[in-house]
Amino acid sequence: MKTTTARLPYLGLALGLLAGCSRDEAPAPAAEATYSRTVTYLDATSPSRFDSIFKSPVLEPFVWQNANDFTVFVTRPPDHETLAFSFARAKLPANPVGTYRFKTVLNATPDVDFAYRIVYDRRRPGSTSWWVYDGSSIPTGSFTITAYDAAHRLVSGRFEVNISDVSDPFALSNTSPNRRCRINFEGTFTNAPVQDVQ
C-alpha cells in the first residue's frame, strides 16, 4: 500500500465510456456490477470494522485494452474508488474464461495485476490524493472471467481479493491515526464493454 499523487495507468483517466451501436444492431445488454468491501481493524479501538456494499448503477464495470494490456475496471464514479485487474495481452488466451491468481512483489508468476484506489479528502484546495493498494500489499484470492462474448465485446466475471496488515483506507489526512487493517473485496460484473484505448 502506498499513498501517491502520481497517475497510474488508466486509473486517473476520465470515465463514462459508452459503446455506440448502428441502427440495425440490437442494443448491448446493460453492464452491471456489485461488490462488498469489508475493512477489519487489527487493533482494539472502536469502530472495529466497516462493511459496505455497492451495486449498479453506482458502480460501472468496463474493460480497456491496447496492444499491451487488457484491464477490467469496476469503478464508483466520479472516480472515488476503483478496482482494476490487469493482464498482459501476450499472456491472455484468445478465450480468457478461467480463474487467475494475483501477482505480488513476492511472486510475479501469476497472470493478473491487482490495484485498488480510493480518493480521500483534499488536504488543501486544489490538491487531490489517494490511497493505492497493489501488488506491494500482497493480495490473495482470485479473479475469474466467467464469460467472454467476442462478437459483442463483453466480459463477465467475479473476484475475491484479500489484503492484510495495510493502512486504513479511511485515514483522510496526515493527522488521522494510521490504523492497520485487513480489507476484503468480493464482487461480480456482467457485460462489461471492451473499449480500445491507446
Image: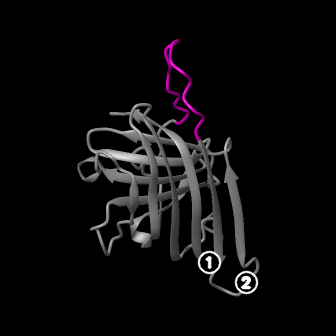
164 shown above or below 27: below
Please tell me which residue lies in front, 101 or 148.
148
81 shown above or below 198: below
Crowding at mark 2 (Cα within 10 Å: few <14, some 14-19, many 20+): few
Left or right, 15 with reference to 122: left
- Tell me, for residue 14, which label it has, or none: none
Q: Please tell me which residue is depicted at 50% across the width and 21% down the height of the picture.
A: 20
Crowding at mark 1 (Cα within 10 Å: few <14, some 14-19, many 20+): some
**Is the stretch drawn in magenta largely helix, strand or loop?**
loop
Going by the numbered disc 1, the residue's amino acid type is: Arg
Earlier in the chain: of badge 2 and badge 1, it is 2
Q: Position of residue 76 (x, y in %)?
A: 61, 47
Colouring scheme, one of rainbow, by chain, secondary structure, one colour: one colour
Q: Please tell me which residue is depicted at 45% across the width and 58% down the height of the picture.
A: 144
Please tell me which residue lies in front, 58 or 120.
58
Which residue is identified by label 2? Answer: 45
Going by the numbered disc 2, the residue's amino acid type is: Thr
Question: Does residue 18 show up magenta in the picture?
Answer: yes
Which residue is identified by label 1? Answer: 179
Q: Position of residue 176 (x, y in %)?
A: 66, 70
Question: Does residue 111 show up magenta in the picture?
Answer: no
Which stretch appears magenta?
15-31
Count the marks: how many? 2
- Tell me, yes or no, whether the two marked residues, 2 and 1, touch with CB atoms within 8 Å: yes
Q: Position of residue 78 (x, y in %)?
A: 61, 41
Q: Quadrant of residue 126?
A: top right
169 shown above or below 73: below
38 shown above or below 154: below
Q: Furthest residue to the right?
A: 46
